[in-house]
Amino acid sequence: MTELELVQKALDMRQYAYAPYSHFRVGAALESVDGRVFTGCNVENAAYGSSICAERTALVKAVSEGAVRFRRIAVAGDSEDYCWPCGACRQMLREFGTELEVLAVNRDGAYRRFTLEELLPHSFGPETLS
Ligand code: THU
């Protein structure tokens, strides 16, 4: 899948967002090194803290289907600004490597590209524990 196709998938996934509280829809598309693409959206909950972001939805779908090596993730929101992954999502993605490319997409499909290392420098990961 091309970078632009991954970005489009993230934008499209916003349609499934369950966001009755924030009204901020987010979509994500995570590509594993073997070319599979796992999608996600934010799923909110009346007990606000039980909500989950789009990136983590995509990540848990991927890991639960056996994918643990990833190439890139696109994250698209409803805002004029790029959709920056929150801290919890950065940390959870970091578990699987710091070289992941992160495409932060705005509502018009414009995006910026970073590595996870750039977004979460000096991070805590599995290597620290070994
Ligand atoms: N949200 C995400 O899905 N991903 C992020 O990285 C930032 C925030 C969601 C969580 C919540 O449902 C809504 O956006 C507003 O914070």
Image: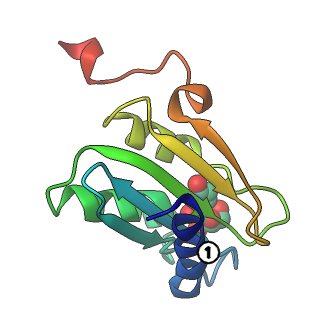
One can see residue 34 in this view: yes
Residue 126 falls left or right of residue 93: left
Q: How is the image coloured?
A: rainbow
Residue 120, position as x, y percentages in the image: 55, 28
Q: Nearer the viewer, residue 82 or 48?
A: 82
Q: For the C terminus, which image quadrant? A: top left
Q: Is residue 13 above or below residue 89?
A: below
Please tell me which residue is depicted at 60% across the width and 32% down the height of the picture: 119
Residue farthest right in this picture: 80
One can see residue 53 in this view: no
Residue 99, position as x, y percentages in the image: 44, 31
Residue 105, position as x, y percentages in the image: 69, 60
Q: Nearer the viewer, residue 37 or 61?
A: 37
Q: Amino acid at mark 1?
A: Leu
Helix, strand or loop for disc 1: helix
Give the residue number, with chain letter if any, for mark 1: 11
Q: Quadrant of ligand 1?
A: bottom right
Residue 130 falls left or right of residue 52: left
Please tell me which residue is depicted at 16% across the width and 63% down the height of the picture: 65
Q: Nearer the viewer, residue 36 or 78?
A: 36
Residue 53 falls left or right of residue 57: right
Q: Nearer the viewer, residue 35 or 16?
A: 35
Q: Mark 1 Cα within 10 Å, few/some/many (few <14, many 20+)?
A: many
Q: Quadrant of residue 17?
A: bottom right
